[in-house]
Image (tube, coloured by chain):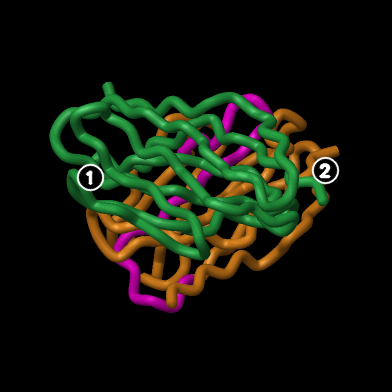
Chain colours: A orange, B green
Amino acid sequence: DVKVTQSSRYLVKRTGEKVFLECVQDMDHENMFWYRQDPGLGLRLIYFSYDVKMKEKGDIPEGYSVSREKKERFSLILESASTNQTSMYLCAGRTGRNQPQHFGDGTRLSIL
Amino acid sequence: GNSVTQMEGPVTLSEEAFLTINCTYTATGYPSLFWYVQYPGEGLQLLLKATKADDKGSNKGFEATYRKETTSFHLEKGSVQVSDSAVYFCALSDGYNKLIFGAGTRLAVHP
């Protein structure tokens, strides 16, 4: 089965820091995704990538960037963390269109 | 545009009760449909899927049938357990890049 691994379950950072959230998948997924999940707002797509070095903006890309240098790794970067970026961040991968996305366990990020 | 509407929760049931969580969708074309489950403090797990009309997805006693005529994908289970307590998300794939999620329905099962 698919395995998507996020490097940290919990993370605490300070306002203004540059923050890296790492995600690794082991199933040669072409497509990878970053979401944030907030109470009352559901899951919102931040960025996605359909191949190495390719990236596309999702619904809420402001304040974030991504990096995909290798197929198995997709990093989310908070350029200058702010308190409104405190959230649960979920990474997902999938093998192709109309296929299910498989999620990691999530990173609960707190910005103080 | 594409959208998914789920019944609001929380849904509170006694153990061994019958579960239905309603899900309807709006989409162009022929989307694939999914149910995901999220246990407390964890990420989303794929529960079941259906890729075309009249398909029935099933897993762990849960079932859902892709009904194109009613644009629905209701989740059912004949006898719930305390361990089924979680948040359930209905989702559709637009065939390109996005999963469109419903807002989620919290299920609480009591002994």
Q: Which mark is residue A14?
A: 2
What residue did someone put label 1 on? B96
Q: Position of residue B5 (x, y in %)?
A: 44, 25
- Residue A80 visible here: yes
In the rendered structure, the residue with mark 1 lies on which chain? B
**On the rendered structure, is A59 left or right of A108?**
left
Residue lying furthest right in this view?
A: A112
- Residue A57 visible: no
Residue A85 occupies quadrant: top right
Residue A3, given in percent of the width and then of the height, sits at 50, 73
Identify the amino acid type marked 1: Tyr
Count of numbered marks: 2
Q: Is residue A27 magenta?
A: yes
Can you tell which quarter of the image residue B88 is in?
top right
For the residues tagged 1 and 2, is the chain the same? no
Which residue type does callout 2 highlight? Arg
- Residue at position x 43%, y 77% from top? A1
Mark nearer the viewer, 1 or 2:
1
What's the residue at 40%, 59% (across, down)?
A: B58
In magenta, the rendered stretch is: A25-45
Q: Is residue A13 left or right of residue A85?
A: right
Q: Is residue B30 left or right of residue B24?
A: left
* Residue A14 horizontal/vertical position (percent): 82, 43
| SS assignment at label 1 | loop
Residue B36: image x %, image y %?
50, 50
